[in-house]
Amino acid sequence: MTESGREIEIEVLRYHPEQDKEPRFQTYRVPFLHDTSVLQGLQYIKDQLDGTLTFRWSCRMAICGSCGKMVNGEPKLSCHTFLRDYYPGKLRVEPLSHFPIVRDLAVDQTDFLEKLEKIKPYIIRDEEKPVSEGVYRQSPKELARYQQFSHCINCLLCYAACPQYGLDSDFQGPGIMALLHRYNSDSRDQGTAERMPIVNAEDGVWSCTLVGYCSEVCPKHVDPAAAVNRNKVNSTMDYFLRFLSPRGADS
């Protein structure tokens, strides 16, 4: 028991694919203080009650993005979500929706990582200038075009919130579209032509059904729904420019 004498029941999804036919829930009683996070509750379970529990975490400061979980059905960073907000009710913790379970609360992120690699999430230059010529300068206005979208921490909460990704995992998804938009909007980048086929594809921005829940759950206020909407405009312009001047578009 803690100094406050409060305990909360945490119901955790357990699944070891090598031995379990299907996932199950296991309940633990966890003591907590006012500032005890859901992640700390899981760590208490692993350290004091059941060392077989598996989950991911790293920084504990809402920066690394690795501790995302479904907390009472909502995608949350478990290090930035507190047990006090669910007391005296029972708390249910599950792995992020729409991803295969590796074990317990850890999910397989392969699909997202493969999509991330394809958009080339870095600045592309046709030709780099010598270091002796100095840095590539940007105005505050140019920075403002993409700065919001550069705050993405790849936590995958937006994917767990996206009903379209849940129905069709071929969809590039909100996080990928936000990061793609971040680099296409950067005045230093010259890789837009390489990324636009991903935007224009059937599983690109046009698969989005405009629910907007992805932006609501983002812990960094990135607003991936806005990135998708802006890229629908960019995709439309790209199509008409190619239609009106196909030779110029290919040159």
Image (cartoon, rainbow, N blue to C red):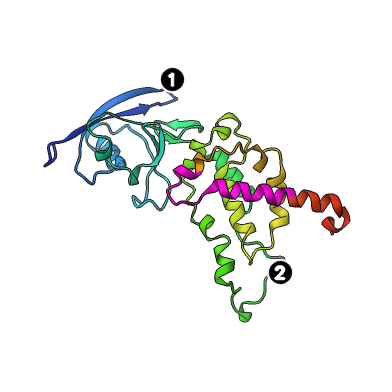
Dot 2 crowding, Cα within 10 Å, few <14, some 14–19, many 20+ = few
Inspect the magenta stretch and tell me whether residue 184 lies in it. Answer: no
**In terms of image quadrants, where is residue 34?**
top left
Please provide percent x and percent y for residue 47. 25, 38
Q: CA distance from mark 2 to mark 1?
A: 53 Å
At which x and y percent is residue 185? 62, 59
Above or below, 64 relative to 206: below
Residue 78 at what x, y percent from top left?
35, 42
Report the magenta residues as a range: 215-236
Nearer the observer, 143 or 45: 143
List the residue tagged with mark 1. Answer: 22
Which residue corresponds to mark 2?
A: 127
Q: Does residue 116 appear left or right of residue 243 in this picture?
A: left
Q: Position of residue 48 (x, y in %)?
A: 22, 36
Q: Nearer the viewer, residue 128 or 16?
A: 128
Disc 1 on helix, strand or loop?
A: loop
**In-image side of 46 versus 72 (left or right):** left
Give the answer, above or below, for where 104 lies relative to 140: above
